[in-house]
Amino acid sequence: MSFLKPFNPLNIATRFVGKKKYIWKDEFIQYPGFKYYPRHPDFKDPPYEPTKLFRVQRIKPLKGVPYFEKSILKDFKLDGKLSDVVILKNMKETNMKLWKIKHLIQIKPVTFPNGFPEDTNGTYLEENGELVIIQKISSEKMQLAEQFQKNVGKMDGDTLRRDSRKKWLSGWDWQ
């Protein structure tokens, strides 16, 4: 019987390290720098097209930051206001510098939902990284807008304000 054996404190503190056999030890996908163990054995990475540009904005203050991180921020022209935004190319050298200051910045990939623009005039970069192309107004719409502004029967803002003030001062018209 087990209770008749002498007490040995080493039996209580025994750990079973390295005794479990893992059946999933060879089921990983090797990526540069780490191993990924997928949930399903038929897992495949979705296709991904890397972006050409990054929208980078500093989100932390410069106070207390080491000089070598400040010099990287100065190289990227991010040593000004927190609201300043910089567009950077997705290159190996740039990514290595961004990795060193990633705790100080916010990086968003720049996407082109309307296609890549030929001309930078008429484009707007949103906060989520979308570069939106503003469509040009056709000549017909321009002519219609000019006709509307030159219309004599149309009341402008100044006329409407004067008319409203006149009605307010005269009181209620009962007739």
Image: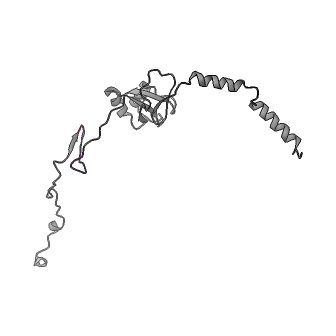
Q: Which residues are magenta?
A: 31-43
Name the spot of residue 139 as percent of width and height, x first: 58, 21
Instruction: From the viewer's side, name the closer residue of 124 and 100.
Output: 124
Image quarter where the N terminus lies is: bottom left
Q: Is residue 117 left or right of residue 19?
A: right
| In the depicted structure, whether residue 128 falls above or below residue 94 | below
Name the spot of residue 98 as percent of width and height, x first: 37, 32
Q: Is residue 8 left or right of residue 71?
A: left
Q: Quadrant of residue 162?
A: top right
Q: At 54% across and 24% down in the image, what residue appears?
A: 136
Q: Is residue 65 left or right of residue 39?
A: right
Instruction: From the viewer's side, name the closer residue of 112 and 79.
Output: 112
Q: At 43% across and 31% down in the image, what residue appears?
A: 55
Name the spot of residue 72 as percent of width and height, x first: 40, 28
Q: At 46% across and 36% down in the image, what residue appears?
A: 128
Whether 38 is among the magenta residues is: yes
Q: At 78% across and 34% down in the image, what residue appears?
A: 160
Q: Is residue 47 left or right of residue 128?
A: left
Image quarter where the C terminus lies is: top right
Instruction: From the viewer's side, name the closer residue of 7 and 41.
Output: 41
